[in-house]
């Protein structure tokens, strides 16, 4: 494999230069996690990196206006003109506004597909730094995609990517220029391109009308895919139950899992996907969060944190197939301390023991704890161990088992982030089969390093995390967010070669990791669509020698949630939260119209580079 040294531990840390930091981010974007947007939203020109694959379809054949035939429907004052200074060729389009509140349109008819990304690019210049606007119209509904308020006086390329909110016949409308809130003047437009990119196969698992969020997933020992998420029947404050779904025909069924995986990845899923489903009712006056599924030799274990009477504890439910239904055990409380125990993560070792890690404020500072259980009976095997130091707040644990073979023993790895010396860094501890080794500091950088996730194969350990650049301490304010990925070599973290040239360096967060059967590394993150914008789900694969092009998993957007990713025999399955959150609220009544869904999005291994 080819590697670039990412960072060593403690004093051997390799720092990113200021010059490199400037090259890899755009400080104009300042998205905050508390804002979201309509599915219809734009990606500004400087938000680079969205790859359009070989399935890219061009909708225009005369975007340079060199031929007299007109695919557009111009207004009477938007004309095709012969212009010596056209961007290319001899012709371009010209529009002029001579008084306030005028607009000159170029309209192009489109049959919109909500499961596709549309990219519009054009070259424009104006006489008076005029306003350029892009709208779409579907039926009688018209929505703005983006606006450039001060176009250049010389030719400049403008580009945006959007996904329509629904299907239907409509128009893409380029307003060139507009004097609604802009100056009068003349604008020239040339070399317009409109392209559409179909998305990989995906399937909506939920009902499309209620609130479904925080998915988790795993494969059990029989190859069945299990999915769990929180279901809010009314409003977010009414989450009195959570749902567990074991897909049958579209994901995995017990009788033919490999065939059904192949069907899903090939886009041949059926409407019967939700047939195998169970609702786990909870007692009254309890609250649930932090769902985490753990694979068992047969069935799966659902971990979650539950509050009752101002006390949070870690609970578990064992799930198994019972014919065509799901059988759920009674909840078992795994922690009984009076403190707040949340964010459980777990992994099952070759000796059928469950290693549970969680975050707790017992003993003062918030710390990471770990305990070993029998995976079948859920009886504790070891005492509770504080994995992190007691004098610093620690958060967001992730756990993995490294087992070279069934008989060679195993290691337990735990990673987390901790706030020390005015910044966040990533730390780890390893149980080597006999004892817990000393705490290791894996990052030592001035930016914030948070939200780690660990993934292990038989002989390697991979870690991904968020790195945030903060010019000054301000809640919710970042100049950049990146996803960093590295392999632990025993002495340092080594980043895959080419990492700094991927879109992971440009406004990506909430990383997820998986290792496929060929040993390739898959990284999924949420990528911001701009200030106050929603987040796309973007996947990349590292073959051991090079990175794949970024793959946008769905044209629909959601929140900055971590996306569970499962490497199956035929491809990647990712569980993506998607909602209809608007860009801004125009009234409180809109909250009643909000809904959130879980989509199963897939990528076939044929889309990935060959393993090195």
Image (spheres, rainbow, N blue to C red):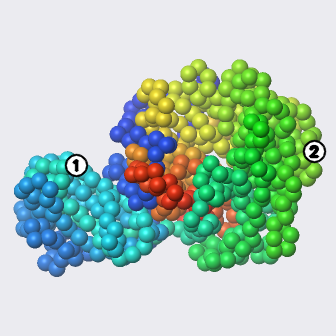
The secondary structure type at the circle numbered 2 is: loop
Q: Horizontal and vertical percent for residue 385? A: 83, 31
Of residues 150 and 503, the one drawn nearer to the viewer in this rendering: 150
- The answer, for residue 432, to whether it is visible in the render is no
Q: Nearer the viewer, residue 172 or 88?
A: 172
Disc number for residue 379:
2
Mark 1 to mark 2: distance in Å?
64 Å
Residue 39 in the image, given as x and y percentages of width and height: 44, 59
CB of mark 1 within 8 Å of CB of mark 2?
A: no
Which sits earlier in the primary sequence, circle 1 or circle 2?
1
Residue 61, picture quadrant: bottom left
Task: Count the labels in the image.
Answer: 2
Percent coordinates x, y for residue 535 in the rendering: 48, 52
The quadrant in which the C terminus is found is: bottom right
x 39%, y 69%: residue? 196
Residue 149's label in the rendered image is 1
Left/right of residue 7 with respect to residue 476 in the rendered view: right
- Say what secondary structure mark 1 lies in: loop
Residue 533 or residue 507, whichever sits in front: 533
Question: Can residue 567 be seen from the camera position used here?
Answer: yes
Residue plotted at (44% across, 25% down) = 472
- Find residue 563 and name its label: none
Instruction: Please give left or right for residue 301 compared with residue 593 in the image.
Output: right
**Label 2 crowding class (10 Å Cα cut-off): few <14, some 14-19, many 20+?**
some
Percent of width and height locating residue 318: 84, 56
Q: Residue at x 78, y 31 (%)?
A: 339
The residue shown at (83%, 33%) is 337
Please give left or right for residue 13 compared with residue 219 in the image. Answer: left
In-front residue for pair 303/194: 303
Mark 1 closeness class: few <14, some 14–19, many ≥20 residues within 10 Å = some
Q: In this picture, is 437 found above or below 294?
A: above
């Amino acid at each position: 494999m080819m590697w670039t040294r990412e960072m060593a531990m403690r004093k051997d840390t390799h720092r990113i230069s200021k010059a490199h930091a400037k090259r890899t981010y755009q400080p104009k974007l300042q998205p905050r996690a508390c804002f979201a947007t309509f599915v219809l939203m734009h990606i500004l020109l400087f938000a680079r990196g969205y790859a359009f694959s070989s399935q890219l379809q061009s909708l225009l054949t005369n975007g340079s206006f060199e031929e007299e035939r007109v695919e557009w429907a111009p207004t009477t004052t938007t004309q095709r003109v012969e212009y010596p200074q056209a961007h290319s060729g001899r012709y371009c389009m010209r529009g002029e506004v001579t008084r306030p509140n005028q607009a000159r349109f170029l309209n192009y008819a489109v049959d919109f597909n909500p499961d596709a990304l549309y990219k519009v690019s054009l070259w424009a210049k104006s006489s008076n730094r005029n306003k350029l606007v892009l709208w779409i119209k579907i039926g009688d509904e018209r929505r703005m995609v983006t606006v450039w308020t001060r176009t250049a006086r010389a030719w400049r390329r403008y580009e945006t990517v959007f996904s329509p909110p629904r299907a239907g016949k409509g128009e893409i409308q380029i307003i060139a220029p507009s004097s609604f809130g802009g100056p009068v003047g003349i604008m020239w437009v040339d070399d317009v391109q409109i392209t559409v990119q179909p998305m990989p196969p995906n399937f909506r698992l939920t009902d499309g009308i209620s609130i479904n969020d925080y998915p988790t997933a795993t494969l059990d020992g029989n190859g069945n895919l299990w999915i769990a998420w929180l279901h809010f029947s009314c409003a977010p404050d009414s989450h009195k139950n959570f749902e567990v779904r074991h897909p049958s025909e579209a994901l995995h069924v017990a009788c033919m899992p490999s065939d059904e995986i192949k069907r899903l990845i090939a886009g041949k899923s059926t409407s019967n996907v939700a047939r195998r489903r169970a609702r786990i009712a909870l007692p009254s006056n309890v609250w649930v969060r932090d769902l985490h599924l753990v694979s068992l030799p047969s069935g799966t274990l659902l971990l979650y944190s539950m509050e009752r009477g101002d006390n949070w504890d870690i609970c578990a439910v064992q799930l198994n197939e019972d014919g065509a239904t799901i059988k759920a055990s009674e909840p078992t409380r795994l922690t009984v301390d009076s403190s707040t125990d949340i964010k459980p993560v777990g992994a099952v070792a070759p000796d059928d023991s469950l290693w549970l890690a969680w975050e707790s404020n017992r003993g003062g500072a918030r710390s990471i704890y770990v305990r070993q259980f029998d995976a079948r009976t859920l009886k504790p095997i070891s005492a509770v161990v504080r994995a992190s130091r007691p004098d610093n707040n620690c958060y967001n644990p992730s756990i993995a088992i490294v087992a070279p073979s069934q008989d060679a023993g195993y290691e337990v790895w735990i990673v987390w982030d901790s706030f020390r010396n005015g910044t966040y860094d990533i730390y780890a501890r390893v149980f080597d089969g006999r004892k817990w080794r000393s705490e290791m500091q894996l990052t030592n950088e001035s930016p914030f390093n948070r939200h780690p996730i660990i993934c292990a194969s038989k002989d390697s350990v991979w870690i991904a995390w968020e790195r945030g650049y903060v010019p000054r301490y301000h809640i919710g304010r970042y100049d950049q967010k990146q996803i960093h990925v590295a392999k632990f070599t025993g002495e340092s973290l080594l980043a895959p070669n080419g990492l700094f040239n991927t879109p992971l360096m440009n406004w990506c967060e909430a990383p997820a990791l998986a290792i496929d059967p060929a040993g390739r590394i898959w990284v999924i993150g949420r990528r911001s669509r701009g200030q106050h914008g929603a987040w796309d789900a973007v996947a990349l694969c590292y073959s051991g020698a090079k990175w794949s092009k970024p793959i946008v998993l769905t044209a629909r957007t959601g929140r900055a949630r971590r996306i569970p990713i499962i490497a199956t025999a035929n491809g990647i399955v990712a569980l993506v939260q998607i909602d209809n959150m608007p860009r801004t609220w125009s009234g409180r009544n809109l909250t009643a119209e909000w809904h959130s869904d879980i989509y199963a999005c897939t990528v076939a291994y044929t889309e990935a580079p060959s393993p090195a």
